[in-house]
Amino acid sequence: MKPTVLLLLALSLIGLSACSETRFESPPGQNIERCDADLAGLWLDIDAKPGELDGFDIDAECRTQLLTRTEAGGPPQAIRVPVNFVHHRGKHYVVVADEALKGLVELPPIHGVNPVPKRSFFIVRYEIRGDRLRMFSVDDRAAARAILDSKLEGTISSTLDELHVYVRGTREQVLQGLDTPGLFERKPGSVLRRSDSTLEQALRETTR
């Protein structure tokens, strides 16, 4: 289950694949922010086809809305999703609780963990370079190797074509775990561009 723009930001965090995922027991650290002012505005997926409106918007009140279509061929919608931001050692992360995605995507229970935790968290690293936003998902295989090597604590559930990783730990342990070398993909899973349009303008133009 890969965070894509829908996961963010559904965060891309769009859609999720059910074959691979990494979830965390706790959000990273105590200094979790509701907004990153550098992300204010409308961001659109650079790979979106004409007529598509995939991305997210953060308004002046720091509300994050995902742009997607809930029905094939239906009008684009802006759906509010609570997300949080963490800044740690010069790097930036989006944190999304799985419960925040209910109704947007189908999330199965965490594999191989009993009792099943009431909630868990997805984490995506991001970089802003000019008018481009690059988002890096957790490398699920790297997270699994880190658990096998005792660099992280957690549970791995693996079959021939599925890999489900659950990283255990307190807030502080998860925060320190973000420093694990190679934990995030080297190449961005999603790249978005900052739009000159407002959310309202983009929605009107797409529905014409």
Image (cartoon, rainbow, N blue to C red):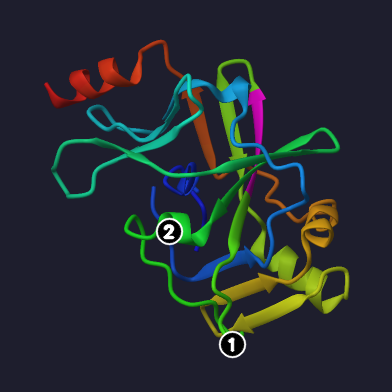
Image-quadrant location for residue 75: top left
Where residue 73 appears, x then y in whole percent? Answer: 13, 43
* Image point (35%, 15%), residue name: 198
Sequence order check, earlier mark of 1 and 2: 2
Q: Main secondary structure of the magenta part?
A: strand
* Residue at (46% x, 32% y) in the render: 63
Q: Judge depth for marks 1 and 2 and give the one in front.
A: 1
- Judged left or right of residue 175, residue 4 is left
Residue at image mark 2:
16
Residue at 42% from the left image edge and 68% from the top image edge? 107
Q: Residue at x 52, y 40 (%)?
A: 190
Q: Which residues are magenta?
A: 124-128
Dot 2, how many residues are within 10 Å of its Cα: few (below 14), some (14-19), or many (20+)?
many
In the rendered image, residue 184 lying in the magenta stretch gets the answer no
Could you tell me residue 118's position as x and y percent? 54, 73
Q: Secondary structure at mark 1?
A: loop
- Viewer-nearest residue: 61 or 167: 61
Figure label count: 2
The relative height of residue 101 versus residue 67 in the rendered view (above or below) is: below
Rate crowding at label 1 as few (under 14), some (14 to 19) or many (20 or more) other CA atoms within 10 Å: few
Q: Nearer the viewer, residue 56 or 103?
A: 103
**Residue 80: percent from the left, percent from the top?**
38, 40
> Residue type at mark 1?
Pro
| Secondary-structure class at tag 2 | loop
Kindly identify which numbered label has been placed on residue 19: none
Mark 1 — residue? 115
Report the quarter where the C terminus lies: top left
For badge 2, the amino acid type reads Leu
Left or right position of 92 against 64: right
Q: Position of residue 71 (x, y in %)?
A: 17, 50
Most distant residue in the top direction: 196
Task: Calculate the distance from the C-alpha at mark 1 to the C-alpha at mark 2.
Answer: 24 Å
